[in-house]
């Protein structure tokens, strides 16, 4: 395998997806990018946006707990990226009934607006994005992280579909929706103009090996001992997931390995310490899942299969048949905890799989 070692670390193994994102943004396209946390979704989008001279506005939809908060976060993102004097001029000319400024001269939504007024305020901010883009002579890219969370209050999809429809009408404004792997087959689509989707699948072992070697060399002049199974142990633990890989590498960099060589015991110690720290998070996660989903997740962790519905697998692990099993599979996919049938129902979080194996072993 030949890879250019001058390639930026965040693009190793992702150059095809990176180029496609650039092409989409350059032609005023919009995008859904999916993957597990730590797969590089935001990094790729931010890098691509820089390539096409784009101003990035980011909204964390986990914080958008209601429609009013969603509009407020959009207003805050605009305040952080444009001259306050120009925003004030626009407000005084167009939207005094919706917006005000706090002591720090930040754009704020007037509290307790009626639903109709909230809609009007939202529409006016979308207009402002195009005005801002023309003034800056740059494109505007809205990145909505974890965007499916708005559906907890946008149950009919009105805000989501309105947002997508309105942004599409502006020639200098685009958006990228960032979501888990589950969203690849769930986002609402206009069949006449579908939203392009890029899914970041796990990387191959040779790509991760190259990436890890480069990271370790640049960060601390460390390298895997070629006379041990250190690299193999690392690759088996992360299963193509650079987010989990980076977590282990940070541990290795802090451990001050003798002679700069990372040996098998160093990797094992780093993994064990990390799993111990993550244990409470994983325990809490299991407590939030229905019992049939926990049972299935544990089964897939200790005994991976691409046919969990088979009679043999059901009998072997004492799983429920029929609708209960199918419901558990769908539930775990929707939560982004396992991949779909196309990817063999693998656990999407390698360290969680490793923790479950150790816990059950």
Image: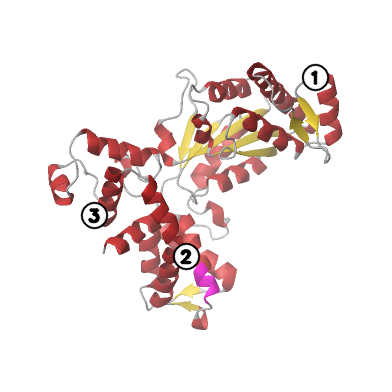
- Residue at 83 percent across and 37 percent down: it is 105
Numbered-mark total: 3
**Nearest to the observer: residue 120 or residue 333:** 120
Q: Is residue 259 magenta?
A: no
Q: Position of residue 112 (x, y in %)?
A: 69, 25
Q: Where 89 falls versus 292 (above or below)? A: above
Q: According to the image, label 2 marks what residue?
A: 248
Disc 1: which residue: 94
Question: Which of pointers 3 and 2 lies earlier in the amino acid sequence?
Answer: 2
Distance between the Cα atoms at labels 3 and 1?
61 Å
Q: Which mark is residue 361?
A: none
In the displayed orientation, state which residue is furthest to the front: 112
Magenta residues, start to end: 251-255
Compare marks 1 and 2 and give the one earlier in the sequence: 1
Q: Residues within 10 Å of mark 1 (few under 14, many from 20)?
A: few
Cβ atoms at labels 3 and 1 below 8 Å apart: no
Q: Nearer the viewer, residue 331 or 66?
A: 66
Counting residues from the start of the chain, the first of labels 3 and 1 encountered is 1
Question: Where does label 3 land, which residue?
Answer: 303
Q: Is residue 239 left or right of residue 247?
A: left
């Amino acid at each position: 395998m030949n890879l250019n070692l001058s390639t930026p670390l965040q693009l190793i193994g992702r150059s095809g997806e990176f180029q496609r994102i650039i092409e989409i943004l350059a032609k005023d396209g919009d995008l859904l990018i999916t993957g597990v946390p730590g797969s590089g979704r935001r990094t790729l989008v931010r890098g691509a946006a820089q390539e096409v001279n784009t101003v990035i506005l980011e909204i964390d939809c986990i914080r958008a707990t209601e429609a009013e908060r969603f509009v407020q976060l959009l207003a805050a993102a605009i305040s952080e990226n444009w001259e306050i004097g120009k925003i004030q001029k626009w407000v005084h000319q167009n939207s005094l009934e919706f917006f005000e400024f706090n002591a720090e001269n930040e754009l704020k939504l007037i509290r307790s607006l009626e639903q109709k007024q909230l809609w009007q305020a939202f529409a006016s901010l979308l207009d402002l994005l195009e005005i801002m883009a023309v003034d800056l002579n740059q494109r505007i890219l809205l990145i909505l992280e974890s965007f499916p969370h708005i559906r907890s209050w946008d149950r009919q999809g009105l805000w989501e579909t309105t947002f997508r429809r309105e942004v599409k009408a502006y020639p200098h404004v685009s958006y990228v929706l960032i979501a888990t792997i589950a969203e690849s087959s769930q986002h609402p689509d206009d069949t006449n103009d579908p939203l392009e989707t890029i899914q970041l699948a796990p990387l191959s072992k040779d790509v991760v090996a190259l990436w890890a070697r480069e990271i370790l060399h640049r960060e601390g002049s460390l390298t895997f001992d070629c006379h041990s199974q250190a690299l193999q142990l690392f690759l088996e633990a992360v299963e193509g997931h650079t987010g989990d890989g980076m977590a282990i590498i940070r541990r290795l960099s802090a451990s001050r390995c003798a002679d700069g060589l990372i040996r098998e015991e160093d990797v094992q110690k780093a993994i064990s310490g990390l799993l111990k720290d993550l244990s409470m998070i994983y325990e809490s996660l299991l407590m939030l899942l229905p019992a049939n989903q926990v049972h299935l997740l544990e089964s897939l962790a200790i005994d991976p299969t691409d046919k969990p519905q088979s009679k043999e697998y059901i009998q072997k692990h004492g799983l429920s048949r029929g609708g209960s099993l199918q419901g558990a599979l769908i539930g775990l996919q929707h939560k982004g905890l396992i991949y779909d049938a196309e990817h063999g129902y693998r656990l999407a979080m390698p360290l969680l799989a490793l923790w479950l194996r150790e816990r059950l072993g």
